[in-house]
């Protein structure tokens, strides 16, 4: 595994996946944090770019891994209401 200022690359056998800002892992975590339902995607250009929904199976796995990690952490956006 290599870490840098912008993100982390994780070696998965022959494949390496990037977990930086806009990656499927990052977007999965963001969706869970903001109480959104899972919808695998990535933002290759970062924020405010067009999302890409045509993901490889590895990217879908990364998205779901990020979603699960954030969800399981119990840290979610507090919208300030009593109903959440």
Image (cartoon, helix red, strand yellow):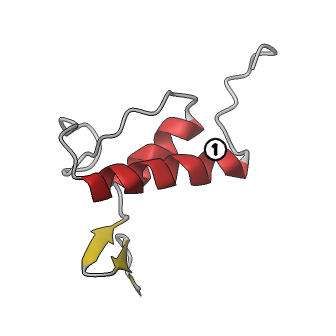
Q: Position of residue 15 (x, y in %)?
A: 25, 75
Q: Which image quarter holds the N terminus?
A: bottom left
Q: Position of residue 14 (x, y in %)?
A: 25, 81
Q: Quadrant of residue 54?
A: top left
Residue lying furthest bottom in this view?
Answer: 2
Q: Residue at x 31, y 68 (%)?
A: 18
| Disc 1, SS | helix
Residue lying furthest right in this view?
Answer: 82
Q: Quadrant of residue 3?
A: bottom left
Q: Position of residue 4 (x, y in %)?
A: 37, 80
Write down the residue under mark 1.
Answer: 71
Does any portion of residue 70 appear in the rendered image? yes
Does any portion of residue 22 appear in the rendered image? no
Q: Position of residue 66 (x, y in %)?
A: 49, 53
Q: Residue at x 66, y 38 (%)?
A: 76
Q: Looking at the picture, does residue 15 appear above or below residue 71?
A: below
Who is closer to the viewer here, 58 or 51? 58
Q: Looking at the picture, does residue 14 appear above or below residue 7?
A: below
Residues packed near mark 1 inside 10 Å, few (<14), some (14 to 19) or many (20 plus): some
Q: Residue at x 64, y 34 (%)?
A: 77
Q: Looking at the picture, does residue 7 appear above or below residue 65?
A: below
Count of labels in the image: 1
Who is closer to the viewer here, 50 or 61? 61
Q: Quadrant of residue 79?
A: top right
Q: Residue at x 34, y 49 (%)?
A: 60
Q: Which image quarter holds the C terminus?
A: top right
Please indicate whether residue 51 sits to the left or right of residue 3 in the image. left
């Amino acid at each position: 595994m290599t870490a840098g200022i912008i993100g982390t690359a994780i070696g998965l056998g022959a494949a390496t996946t990037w977990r930086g800002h806009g990656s499927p892992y990052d977007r999965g975590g963001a969706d869970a944090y903001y109480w959104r339902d899972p919808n695998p995607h990535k933002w290759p250009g970062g924020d405010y770019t067009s999302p890409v929904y045509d993901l490889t199976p590895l990217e879908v796995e990364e998205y779901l891994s990020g979603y699960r990690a954030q969800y399981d952490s119990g840290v979610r956006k507090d919208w300030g209401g009593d109903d959440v």
